[in-house]
Amino acid sequence: MSRYDLTRRGLLRTGMIAGAGLAMPTIFTSRANAYVNEPKGGSVTFGFNVPQTGPYADEGADELKAFKLAVKHLNGEGDGGMLGTFSSKALKGSGVLGKKVEFVTGDTQTKSDAARASAKSMIEKDGVVMISGGSSSGVAVAVQSLCQEAGIIFMAGLTHSNDTTGKDKKANGFRHFFDAYMSAAALAPVLAKQYGKDRKFYMLTADYTWGWTQAASMKDFMEKEGWKMVQDVRTPLASTDFSSYLAPVLSSGADVLILNHYGGNMVNSLTQAVQFGMRDKQVNGKQFEIVVPLISELMAKGAGKNIQGILGSSNWNWKLQDEGTKAFVKSYGTEYGVPPSQAAQTCYVQTLLYADAAERAGSFDPCAVGKELEGFKFDGLGNGPTLYRAADHQCFKDVLVVQGNEKPENEYDLLNVAEITPVDKVMYEPDNEFFKGGELGKCNNGAA
Amino acid sequence: MLGLERKDFVFLIVVLALTLAAPILLNPFPENSALAQFNAGYPDLMQRIAIFAIFAVGFNILFGLTGYLSFGHAAFLGAGSYAAMWMFKLLSMNILPAIVLSVLIGGLFSLLIGYVSLRRSGIYFSILTLAFAQMSFNLAYSVLTPLTNGETGLQLALTDPRVLDAANNSGSLPDTALFGLAMNSTTKVEMLGRVFQFNVGYYVCGLISVLMFYVALRIFRSPFGMMLRAVKSNQNRMNYTGLSPRPYTLAAFVISGMYAGLAGGLMASMDPLAGAERMQWTASGEVVLMTILGGAGTMLGPVLGAGFIKYFENIFSKINETVLHGWFSALPHAIQDPLVWLAARFTGEGWHLTLGVLFMLVVIFLPGGLVEGGQRIGGLFRRRKTDDPEHHPKRAPHVAE
């Protein structure tokens, strides 16, 4: 065994060498960047942060497929998808600003902490200029604020809470997906028309930011239509058995049940409600109805037959007949053999929108890109004419009211578009009571 | 020196040196090489490793010395994070008051839970702590939303008062700092084709973790530590000699709770957001895993375990199929695709599986954790003569009671 003889002098010497070593970095100055993660080589890196494990893993897998497809199209591989139908022609399929697009992926685990850790490693280790993805509002809000602090752009994926572009909005964050307010605004008139004006409704609400804003928006709009709320019951996000929450519904005197649930929650609560025989009951002399304000294809698939005839809203559906949708469904179908979900569409579109804005700005500087996105009007990406509003970085476009298909022809034919609510019916002011309280702040490009 | 024997002092110096040099040591591969994927020398991961090392070292004071297996330590970590966040929101962006409060809150909270849980031992103690932690998680997640901001997590806002700080008119959120030294400021140095990132936040975490390592070392070597070991080896005998184990176990519980609170406070200082998931039972399980994987009851074990698990979580989870295809691209498609498929089960979202397999292997073949593995390898190269029994005492069995 070797011996270590420690003397005061020896220790001092070691300490000085260590100190000098630590001081070294200040001698070499770091490379000067105009903004954080400025791409210097022949490629630029995007970060796709999606849930690969946990309750929303299905949505995450679909989002990732869409991202990969978008990158392919940006680099000029494949059939180009919606690049051909996009109203802006800045992108030529030769990368972005002449740089080949590369990407890294990460797992958000649908947890704010894990999502931020993954996003941070993308920024610090992989040098991404933009992060996109996510399929929970909690995660979206958390990652958005991280991107704001770090000085890169966040292109939100599937997030439906009013808060994302409401009280938690950030200058570096942009959302293409619609929100709870728009869902309620689009759905309320249709519900009133189909089920009558004199209805009493009962709500079960997932107990977190998305659920709360969804419930508040639904209550507001339905009461404007003359409906009366009997009760709004909060259910824990982690619950799988809703029977104890469903049992009091029929005896409460309500004749409509609104399920502010998403993903696996909604599949379980709807299935159990149907098993309770709710849809066959007559209450107050009227047929009992169930409404699910936010429906996705993946949820419809999980709920199976129980979704038939149920009304809800969607951001997009693969059965739309515009050119953008057709081109996207075709290239996604060729690549993966299944039609894309609305989560896939929003993520694909967000990637294209970012790339296009960077191309037009002539730089990946987040402030320059942000300026191009603000107030940007575009078409041909599946949702009709769309505006990226500058005041809150929210996209405004038509909202789909969908209904569970009574006679599905195949396993993907689960939802029908019942009505397309035009954008002016779902428009709101940035200081609307559901959205006020936050500030965009200033764009941050990370340059010290 | 510093109240330590020479052997321990040298050990501490080695730990300090490793901590200081981590940004270089963890970046062994050149920037553009295929192996750059495995570099871990970026601030966020290094901060996390240092923070979780504190957490695990503290946990080890309870578990390694007294044998009480707590399944609820994440609750103290979470409480510490929330406490720190509130200091950032109300008082100042200086991390010092935040860290002090987080340690206090961690201590108080653990005193409360420990006082009740320590009435039982063995599995009942574990279940009690688990129940309390899960209760705290649910409270933070929904009931206490005004205090914790529920699922979204507690965040900074432009409108926070921050009474001690100068008014902020920049329109962007202030950074956490230590007397003006921003935690997220990083000096990048390019050398030998590698980019080394020297980050203020990491050095703050690293130095605090070395300090806490030193405190733990002192506890391990103290008469108090000896009493804790006595609790583990035979509580009945301790009772018969007229000593009550409860004050000792409670003290150990509170100390480890304060370590956890400190870790939580540091986490919030490095990344100002506190989410309820930090308190979930999986987070509590993680620290148990770290301690056992590294070697419970050893000094270095928990640190190794923390580094190992965080490395896997952050590096392996990012190896996706595209990367794998890149690695195996030299092979013909017929071999490449099955290989990629197989490897993809263990990387990317499959990293949990790799970790699980490793954990099983360690528990079965190296019950003393990675530290035992290191000792065995060391033993292979050493002559038998130096294998003196004095420094390799018989391992005390883990007792349930």
Image (tube, coloured by chain):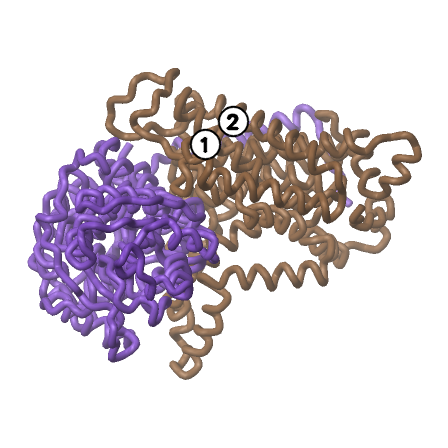
Chain colours: A purple, B brown
Q: Earlier in the sequence, mark 2 or mark 1?
A: 2
Residue shown at the point (41%, 43%) measured from the top left: B151
Distance Cα–Cα, label 2 vs label 1: 8 Å
Rendered view: A28 above or below B96: below
Chain bearing tag 2 is B
Q: Of all residues shown, which one is farthest toward the bottom?
A: B334
Q: Front-most of A170 and A95?
A: A170
Circles 2, 1 touching at the beta carbon (< 8 Å): yes
Q: Front-most of B334 and B97?
A: B97
Kindly identify the amino acid type of the residue bearing the numbered disc 2. Answer: Ile
Residue shown at the point (61%, 33%) measured from the top left: B259
Pointer 2 residue? B99
Residue A282 appears in the figure: yes
Mark 1 neighbour class, 10 Å CA radius: few under 14, some 14 to 19, many 20 or more: many
Dot 2 falls on a residue whose secondary structure is helix
Q: Which mark is residue A229?
A: none
Residue shown at the point (36%, 51%) measured from the top left: A126
- B286 vs A282, left or right, is right
Q: Position of residue A262 (x, y in %)?
A: 35, 55
Q: Front-most of B287 and A430?
A: A430
Q: Which mark is residue B269?
A: 1
Mark 2 neighbour class, 10 Å CA radius: few under 14, some 14 to 19, many 20 or more: many
Dot 1 falls on a residue whose secondary structure is helix
Q: Position of residue A415 (x, y in %)?
A: 24, 68
Residue shown at the point (36%, 47%) measured from the top left: A139
Kindly identify the amino acid type of the residue bearing the numbered disc 1. Answer: Ser
The quarter of the displayed image where residue A48 is located: bottom left
Q: Quadrant of the N terminus of chain B?
A: top right
- A340 vs B334, left or right, is left
